[in-house]
Image (cartoon, rainbow, N blue to C red):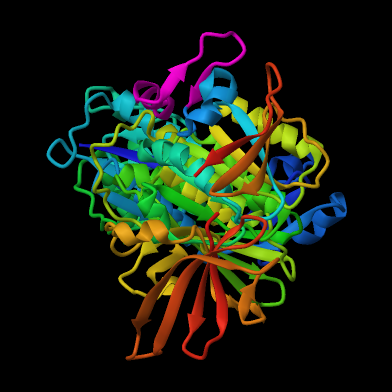
Amino acid sequence: MSVLADAWGRAGVRRGTASTVSTVMSTGFAELDRCLEGGGWPVGVLTELRVGRAGIGEMRLLLPVLATLGREGRLMWVAPPYRPCAPALAAHDIALNHLVIVRPRTHKEALWAVSQGLASPAVGAVVSWFADIREQEFRALQRQAAEGGHWSFCFLPRNLAPKPSRLRLVLEPAPKGVRVTLARKAGRPVAPLIVTL
Amino acid sequence: MLWQAVVLTALPLEVFASHETPFAVVEGKTLVACNACARERGLTPGLSVVRAAASCPSLVFAPRDRAAEEALLEGLAAFAYGFTPQVVLRADGVLMRFTDKASPIGDPHRLVASVARGLADMGYAFEIAMAPTAVAAWLCARAAMRCVWTPKDPWRALLRPLPLAQLPLADAAREACRALGLTRVGDLLDMPRSGLVRRFGREVVSLLEELMGERPEVESFWAPAPRFRRRLCFSHSAETEEALAFALARIVREWVAVMRARDARADGFVVEMSHEDGSVRSETFTLTRPERDGQVLVRLIRERLRDLRPASPITAVTLSAPLEASTEGSLPLWHDGQWYEQGFGGLVDRLRARLGREAVRALSVRPDHRPERASREDPWPPQGPQGSAGAVAAERPIWLMDPPERLEVICGMPTLRGPLRLARGPERVETGWWDEPVVRDYFVAVNPACEYFWVFRSAQDEWFLQGYFA
C-alpha cells in the first residue's frame, strides 16, 4: 500500500469527503476534474474508456495521471494496440524504466496479466486494451481493482454492449482535443465536454 | 565429539513420485521397498516379485534407480553441509560430525530438532540419532532409537540392548553370531576380544572398538557440489499437469532446504522433462532477484507448466540450479518471500513464467533520428539510455506505426478517412546514410474527423502514416 500512501502525500491528490468516493487523483485537466465525482480519476475503479478508433487523443488524456502514478509505482500496459513511442512518452514525463508492456497472445492471457497487475502493490496503474470482454470477466477485474486499490483503465471499442462499470467515458475526436461524454457515473449527468489536450 | 546419523528409511521409494496405490521398488527378483499402501496389503521388502504380484494383483513395480538415489543422497549431504562441514555419505543416509572446533554445537537436542525439521520439510521418511561415535549414532538411527546421547550420558551401557542385526557386519560374521546365539550388542561386547578376533576376524573387533570410541574412526568427508540437481522418475508416466506439479513441488522443497543450509539463493534454474518417446524438453527460468522461497518458486513453475501440452507422457523430471552463496545476506528472512511475491520483481517473473520472455517488454529511447528506431520495445528489463528525449519529442506521436503505412493520395493530397490538412511542418529527417538512407519530410496532419496523425513525404514523393497523436 506504500504506493497509495505516497500518492496521498503528493499534490493533485485529494481524499474525498463524500462516503461514496474514497480517493481520487487529478486528471490534469481542470474541466474534466470538475465533472468527475471527487474531482479526478477514482481509485479502486476499473474506469471504462470507449473509443471508436485508437489514436484520437485517448492517451494524452491519461498521460498526466500515469506520469504521477508511474513516478513511485510501476505502470503496466496490457495489449496496447500499437507500438508506444518512447521519446514521446518520456516527453510526457512517463518514467520509461517504470513502464512494463505486456503483449499477451490470447484473451485469456490478457485477463490473467491484468489481474496479476491489479493484485500487485508495486503497480501504480494498469491500463488494458480489449477488443471485447465478457460481463463476468469485467466484473472480476473490477472486483480486483477495488480490492487492490489501484487506478485502472480499460479501453474498449465504442460499439460494445455496456459493461457493469462504475465510470464510463466515451471519447471522440474533437478540434485540438477530445470530446468526453460521461456515460456512466455517480451523481448528476453532465453534458459532453471538450478537453483541450 | 558428536556424531549425528540420518538414515533414509525408504530411500528406494523416495526417488519415485508418490503413489496412492500399492507400489514397490524391485531389485533383481525381490522387493526392496514398498509404500504404505502396499504394506497394508501385507507386502514387505524381501518378498519375491512373483509372490508379491500373486498376493496383490494391483501392485505397480518399478526397478530400483541407484543413480537417482545417489543424486538424492548428494542433495541430503548438501543439506547436512549447512550444519557442519564434516559430512560422510553412506549408502542410505549421511553422518554428520560435530567438533567444537569445526562447528559450535550449542544444545545437541535443538540441533537434532532443527535437522529433523529440515528433513520433514523435504518430505523424507527418516530416522535420526546422535551419539559420541559414528558407529553408535548409525546403530541407533538404524534401530529407530531417536536418541540424543552426549559423552556425559551412560551411552556405552545404553548400547548393550540394541540388536546386533543393525551393526554393519559381514555376512559370515552375522551368520556366526546367529549360530552362537548372540543377538544383542552387549552379547558381543561380553565375549573376550582375543576370541572374537579368532572367530570372526579382525574387522569385527575394529568395529566394536569404533563403536565404543576406543579407536579413532577414519572417515572421508564429502565435498559439496557446485550445483543442485535432482531427478524424480514417474513409475507410470505423468499424465496430468497436477502430478508433474506435485513432483516438482517436492523437488523444490528439497532444493530450498539445501539453499537454506548453504545460504544460497537461486537466480535461475532449469527444469527438464523426459518424455516417453525419448525427447527431453528443457525450460529455463531466470529470476530478476535471487530467491529461495519455496512457494514463490513453485508458483513460477506452475505458471509456466499451466499451458504445457506435452507431446508424449512424461517419465522423469529434473531440476538443476547452481548453488552459490547468497550475496544478499542482509535481507530480512521472515518476510522475504512475501515481500518479493508482492513486489515488482515477483510480478515480472510470474508474467514471464506464464507468458514467455518475449511477452513482457520495456521501452527505451535510442539515439537515432529515424522515429521507428529511436523508440525500442525489447523484452524486459529496460535497456540502454533512459536520457531525456529533448524538446522536439513533444511533437512525436504516442502510437508508432512500424513499418510506416502507405497513404492514399487523392488530387495530390494524402488522405486518411478524408483529405489530410497539414497543420505543422515540414520537419526534415535525413539520416542513416551508412545503412539505409532516409530523407523524409514530416508533418502533423489532421483529417476532417479531427484525428491527428504524424505523416511524412518520402524522397520519392510518396506519403506514409508514421503515427497517431493518441
Q: Nearer the viewer, residue A47 or B382?
A: A47
The reply to whether the magenta stretch includes residue A22 is: yes
Q: Is residue B320 visible in the rendered structure shown here?
A: no
Looking at the rendering, the stretch of residues picked out in magenta corresponds to: A1-25
Q: Which of B89 and B411 is in front in this view?
A: B411
| Vertical position of residue B224 compared to residue B165: above or below | below
Residue at left offset 78%, top offset 46%: B21
| Vertical position of residue B42 compared to residue B382: above or below | above
Residue at left offset 71%, top offset 77%: B277
Q: Which quadrant is home to the N terminus of chain B?
A: top left
Give the quarter of the image for residue B140.
Answer: top left
For the image, the number of numbered tags is: 0
Q: Which quadrant is home to the C terminus of chain B?
A: bottom right
Residue at left offset 57%, top offset 44%: A127
Image x and y of residue A46, in percent: 63, 33
Image x and y of residue A178, in percent: 59, 44
Q: Which of A3 and A58 is in front in this view?
A: A58
| Vertical position of residue B102 compared to residue B48: above or below | above
Residue B427 shown left or right of residue B462 in the figure: left
The reply to whether the magenta stretch includes residue A160 is: no
